[in-house]
Image (spheres, rainbow, N blue to C red):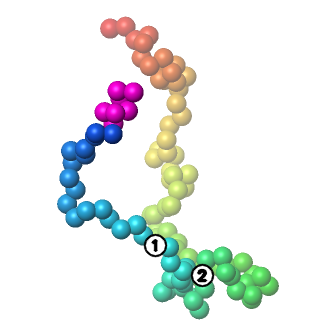
């Protein structure tokens, strides 16, 4: 009971400048300004159901000497396989190491 009465008398020691912030009011969903033909997410178009899947004609291709995945790199630049001894050391947290 004492804790409850102490809680009722609590006065916040931090005073925030500007008072409480107004809560945002929900508004009607609108299409993004750059959306094609004013389409909204999930709305879709009637012609898209009959058409072929989207294909980007300007797909990015790596320049000469560039690659997008480590698997495309030469073997010397790829990650090395972890040895069993390293796995055991990691799992034990180094507890077995004696200096």
Q: Position of residue 51 (x, y in %)?
A: 76, 85
Indicate the quadrant where residue 16 lies: bottom left
Question: Residue at 49% across / 45% down in the picture?
Answer: 78
Q: Position of residue 41 (x, y in %)?
A: 61, 77
Position of 27 with respect to 11 (left or right) is right
Q: What quarter of the picture does the C terminus occupy?
A: top left
Question: Residue at 70% across / 86% down in the picture?
Answer: 45
Looking at marks 2 and 1 on the same chain, the residue that comes earlier in the sequence is marked by: 1
* Location of residue 16 with respect to 89 vertically, above or below: below
> How many callouts does the rendering have?
2
Question: Residue at 50% across / 37% down in the picture?
Answer: 80
* Location of residue 98 with respect to 9 vertically, above or below: above
Q: Marks 2 and 1, Cα distance to the nearest angstrom?
A: 20 Å
Q: Which of 69 and 96 is in front in this view?
A: 96
Q: Where is residue 37 in the image (x, y as percent from the top left)?
A: 59, 92
Q: Give the range drawn in magenta.
A: 1-7
* Location of residue 65 with respect to 35 vertically, above or below: above
Magenta-colored segment: predominant secondary structure: helix
Q: Single out the residue that lies furthest toward the top.
A: 98
Indicate the quadrant where residue 53 lies: bottom right
Question: Residue at 46% across / 47% down in the picture?
Answer: 77
- Is 84 a magenta residue? no
Q: Single out the residue that lies furthest toward the bottom.
A: 37
Q: Is residue 60 visible?
A: yes
Q: Is residue 85 visible?
A: no
- Is 2 a magenta residue? yes
Query: Which labelled disc corresponds to residue 25?
Result: 1
Q: Position of residue 95 (x, y in %)?
A: 42, 12
Crowding near the residue tagged with mark 2, few <14, some 14–19, many ≥20 C-alpha atoms within 10 Å? some
Crowding near the residue tagged with mark 1, few <14, some 14–19, many ≥20 C-alpha atoms within 10 Å? few
Q: Is mark 2 on a helix, strand or loop?
A: loop
Identify the residue under disc 2: 40
């Amino acid at each position: 009971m004492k804790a409850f009465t102490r809680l009722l008398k609590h006065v916040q020691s931090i005073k925030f400048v500007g008072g409480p912030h107004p809560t945002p009011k929900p508004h009607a969903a609108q299409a993004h300004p750059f959306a094609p033909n004013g389409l909204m997410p999930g709305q879709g178009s009637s012609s898209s159901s009959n058409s072929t899947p989207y294909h980007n004609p300007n797909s990015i291709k790596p320049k000469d000497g560039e690659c997008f995945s480590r698997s495309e790199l030469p073997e010397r630049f790829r990650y090395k396989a972890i040895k069993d001894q390293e796995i055991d050391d990691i799992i034990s947290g180094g507890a077995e190491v004696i200096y």
